[in-house]
Image: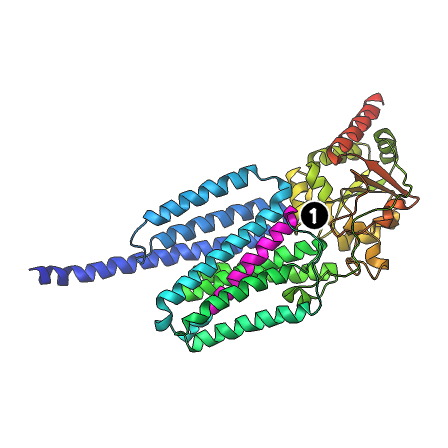
């Protein structure tokens, strides 16, 4: 009877399993579409919020589809891990300041890459002897990219957070050492594909890739951190794609490929914007020079003016270009900047925002802040489009920016930012700089622009100073 029952039930069970697989495939397909549309919509500020929602829905569907797979026989540890992750992730998202987005992004890259590396390690030790060479090759990519991205992202986090020095750490023969570690890692990974039984070499592979991740980031200067963030994002995505091949998960391959290629493309775009070699970026040591200054600024005279004088000069201008930078992010001045924009616009002043591709600490940092303050998207102009307009501009108002307007990028061949395209703020008729003091920028380079005759320093916290200027403008307006 039991045999007869099994014989009758088996076809039904197989049909149910096939139906579940079809549903999973459908869920994965919709999820993949969500990821693709998220990337498309995130490419423009006006559709960015819709892109975030599409990505969130796609990820939710991906998790649900994965949890439906027959390979999962117990949910206890999955639920525990999800609760722990939520307990950590929710406070991070709610309590994190906007100025900390870059380092939080780097930290997220680190955790995602570590997960990929650990999954690859588990797959190798559990099933390595029975896996095909294709699967072993995928695991090799997954482990190498995962672990080097883990330590590299932690180093980037440390530099952005101020735990580690932002200046490049250099030594003779550094590039050869880096290439040597990377080459040895690839060689060991290749050998394990052919001889998976040589498990004693696997810890060496992990150790070398962890060290290479550190060595990849230490020679990179703080001014180049936005490119590093984009590159590490690409590495983490490619590690996830390799994990998809190892686990035979189509959606993971798609999501990882989208993440990896978008990160690498962004890195190339950033390198072009900063006049850096992408080859050097791949192996570290870019943006590095032995001539970096220590951030000390000699005593030199500058011109400073009050909020009243600032308001009067801005009101009497026909055109103003505002250049936001990290200082605006630190003081959370974006909403006051919006009030300034509104006040000047009401007075007939043409106000636009010049966006440098590496202003802040990550790509798009300034766009996010200004969009949060509901500044019209058509007023945010990219560097290439607006640079030719500075000579015809009455006032260039720099709010917390430094390296991206530093003329040393054009003139000083010993500078770590030499060759980096900058915003031509120095070509405006008048330059105003809102700054707490005369300290150097993130690259540790003194800015000669601050000492020019046409430059006026507006000393103070950006949020407070701009608020005072807005009050003066409103008072003059009310008086009329």
Locate residue 36, reporting x and y percent.
52, 56
Residue in front for this viewpoint, 219 or 22? 219
451 horizontally vs 273: left or right: right
Residue 279: which quarter of the image?
bottom right
Check the image and tell me how it is coloured.
rainbow
- Please say if 383 is above or below 377: below
Residue in front for this viewpoint, 400 or 181? 181
346 horizontally vs 240: left or right: right
Indicate yes or no whether the magenta region holds residue 144. yes
Residue 366: which quarter of the image?
top right
Locate residue 402, reporting x and y percent.
78, 47
Indicate yes or no whether the magenta region holds residue 101. no
Q: Tell me the residue at 39%/64% (across/down).
A: 123
The crowding category of the residue bearing disc 1, from other C-alpha atoms within 10 Å (few below 14, some 14 to 19, many at least 20), is many
Locate residue 135, reporting x and y percent.
42, 70
Q: Give the dominant element type of the magenta stretch: helix, strand or loop.
A: helix
Q: Circle 1 is placed at which residue position?
A: 360
- Magenta extent: 140-163
Disc 1, SS? loop
Q: How many labels does the image show?
A: 1
Residue 200: which quarter of the image?
bottom left
Q: Tell me the residue at 55%/59% (across/down).
A: 149
125 horizontally vs 3: left or right: right
Q: Residue furthest left?
A: 1
Q: Which quadrant is home to the C terminus?
A: top right
Q: Which quadrant is home to the N terminus?
A: bottom left
Q: Residue furthest top?
A: 479
* Residue 262 appears in the figure: no
Locate residue 104, reporting x and y percent.
58, 47
């Amino acid at each position: 009877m039991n045999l007869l029952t099994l014989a009758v039930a088996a076809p039904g069970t197989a049909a149910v399993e096939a139906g579940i697989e079809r549903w999973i495939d459908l869920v994965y397909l919709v999820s993949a579409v969500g990821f693709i549309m998220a990337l498309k919509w995130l490419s423009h500020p006006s559709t960015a919020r819709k892109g975030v929602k599409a990505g969130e829905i796609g990820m939710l569907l991906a998790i649900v589809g994965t949890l439906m797979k027959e390979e999962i026989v117990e949910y206890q540890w999955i639920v525990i891990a999800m609760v722990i992750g939520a307990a950590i992730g929710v406070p991070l998202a709610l309590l994190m300041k906007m100025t900390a987005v870059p380092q939080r992004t780097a930290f997220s890259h680190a955790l995602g890459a570590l997960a990929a590396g650990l999954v690859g390690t588990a797959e190798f030790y559990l099933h390595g002897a029975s896996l095909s060479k294709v699967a072993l090759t995928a695991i090799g990519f997954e482990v190498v990219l995962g672990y080097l991205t883990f330590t590299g992202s932690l180093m980037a986090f440390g530099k952005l957070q101020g735990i580690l020095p932002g200046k490049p750490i250099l030594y003779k023969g550094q590039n050869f050492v880096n290439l040597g570690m990377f080459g040895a890692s690839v060689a060991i990974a290749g050998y394990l594909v052919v001889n998976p039984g040589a498990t004693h070499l696997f810890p060496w592979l992990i150790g070398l890739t962890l060290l290479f991740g550190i060595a990849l980031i230490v020679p990179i200067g703080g001014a180049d951190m936005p490119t590093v963030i984009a590159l590490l994002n690409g590495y983490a995505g490619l590690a996830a794609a390799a994990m998809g091949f190892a686990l035979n998960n189509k959606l993971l391959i798609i999501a990882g490929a989208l993440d990896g290629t978008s990160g690498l493309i962004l890195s190339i775009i950033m390198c072009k914007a900063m006049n850096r070699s992408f080859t050097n970026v791949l192996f570290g040591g870019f943006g590095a020079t032995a001539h970096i200054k220590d951030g000390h600024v000699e005593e030199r005279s500058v011109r400073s003016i009050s909020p009243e004088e600032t308001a009067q000069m801005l009101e009497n201008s026909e055109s103003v270009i505002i250049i936001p930078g990290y200082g605006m992010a630190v003081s959370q001045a974006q909403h006051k900047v919006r009030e300034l924009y509104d006040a000047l616009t009401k007075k007939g002043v043409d106000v636009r925002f010049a966006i440098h591709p590496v202003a802040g600490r990550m790509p798009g940092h300034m766009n996010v802040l200004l969009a949060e303050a509901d500044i019209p998207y058509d007023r945010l102009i990219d560097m290439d489009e607006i640079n030719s307009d500075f000579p015809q501009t009455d006032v260039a108002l720099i709010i917390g920016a430094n390296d991206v307007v530093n003329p040393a990028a054009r003139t000083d061949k010993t500078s770590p930012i030499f060759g980096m395209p900058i915003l031509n703020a120095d070509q405006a008729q008048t330059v105003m700089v809102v700054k707490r003091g005369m300290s150097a920028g993130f690259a540790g380079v003194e800015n000669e622009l601050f000492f020019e005759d046409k430059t006026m320093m507006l000393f103070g916290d950006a949020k407070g100073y701009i608020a005072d200027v807005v009050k003066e403008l409103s008072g003059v307006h009310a008086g009329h």
